[in-house]
Image (tube, rainbow, N blue to C red):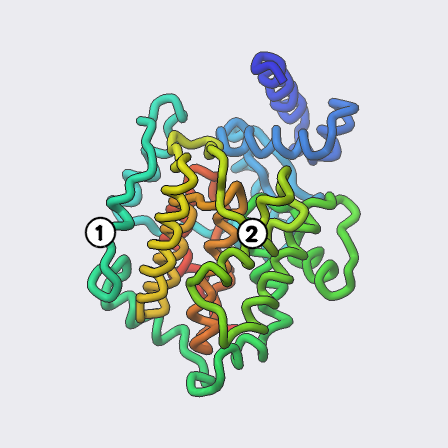
Amino acid sequence: MPRHRREDDLAQIVEIVRQSADGARRSDIAKALKEVPRRTLQSWLRSLVEDGRLIQEGKGPAARYRLPATAKASKETVAHQAGPEEDKLAAVRVPLSPESKKISDYLRQPVAARKAVGYDRKFLDSYRPNATFYLSPKEREHLAEVGKTKNAVEPAGTYAKQILSRLLIDLSWNSSRLEGNTYSLLDTRRLIEFGEEAQDGNRLEAQMILNHKDAIEFLVSDAEEIGFNRHTILNLHGILAQDLLPDEAAAGRLRHIAVGIQQSAFHPLELPQLIEECFDQLLATAEAIRDPYEQALFAMVQLPYLQPFDDVNKRVSRLAANIPFIRGNLSPLSFNDVPRFSGQASVMLACCGLVLGLVQL
């Protein structure tokens, strides 16, 4: 689609929202635009929200879009429309260090104002397992305390199997939500437990959630065998990417093509041989880390940064981060209370995930 035509469509959506005194739902906007495919409209709305031209309040069919200037005044009204889970997440504010605040401010700039950068292998090469740490001793000690369960001496996967039904729903919903999936927690529960798709959802969103369910079951059922190795991570990607990629053969396979990151000035590696080399080094480094929380954070940071797959990299990293917790019978990382960031802030999300997402199930 020509750029000027797309901008005209976006401007029309903003005008529709401007004329809606109580905000506009996606269905209202679709009715006004007529004959616009649902996925296209979802993409346009997501772009407008990420650019700050609109604010989304609530989730799923009840979500309303407003202009930034009117959003604050409508806060109480929207609180009654959204579900309790969405209300809770909307209120979350991630605490940032001064250094992280600077990064956040930098990422709020337009893409054109940022310096284009490529993959820096020194970031991986400089990490020495059990000598280099992303987490401080105090942070690792705190996480070890809040993450322990009564099943520490049981066979690998014992605790995850005990809470499997809840883990399937919570982790599938939260990880999908962070990708922009509009299913509510209740919709996710119905889909996983009864196979009922949401009436206002689309097939790809349902597929994403069901793929998460299958991937989690794979990790838990093979708890004795999983690890940071090719078998586990490639199978994890293959399950998560099933029926979601333009090239079906790319599921469970390392990337052979160049990719770009939406709303980012970062350019991942392009040479397949180098991607494969870094991937193997990343896995060997991760497997050598003894602390489970450091190991999880290393995976969440390094996998999305490398972008070893055509797509679905962040989803792989979020589930791979649970490998040490499933093996060690620790409380899993379900990403509860982690608000959704735009794609440009995915690394920030990974860095705060252990602090906000680790919950005792």
Q: Residues within 10 Å of mark 2 (few under 14, many from 20)?
A: many
Residue that lies at the very extreme toward the front in this rendered image: 273
Taking 87 as reference, is 325 left or right? left
Most extreme residue toward the top is 4
Helix, strand or loop status at disc 2: loop
**Residue 334 tag number:** none
Under mark 1, the amino acid is Ser
Specify whether residue 358 is in view: yes
Position in image of residue 30 (x %, y %): 74, 29
Quadrant for residue 168, please give it: bottom right
Q: Earlier in the sequence, mark 2 or mark 1?
A: 1
Inspect the image, locate mark 2, and give the three-letter code of the amino acid beneath it. Answer: Gly
Residue at the spot x=35%, y=51% of the render?
A: 95
Residue marked by disc 2? 252
Which residue is more in the foreground, 49 or 90?
49
Q: Residues within 10 Å of mark 1 (few under 14, many from 20)?
A: few
Q: Image point 50% across, 76% down: which residue?
A: 224
Q: CA distance from mark 2 to mark 1?
A: 28 Å
Question: How far across and down, in percent of the image, does residue 258 sit?
Answer: 47, 33
Closer-to-camera residue (39/91): 39
Secondary element at image label 1: loop
- For label 1, the residue is 126
Left or right of 227 in this view: 253: right
Can you see residue 335? Answer: no
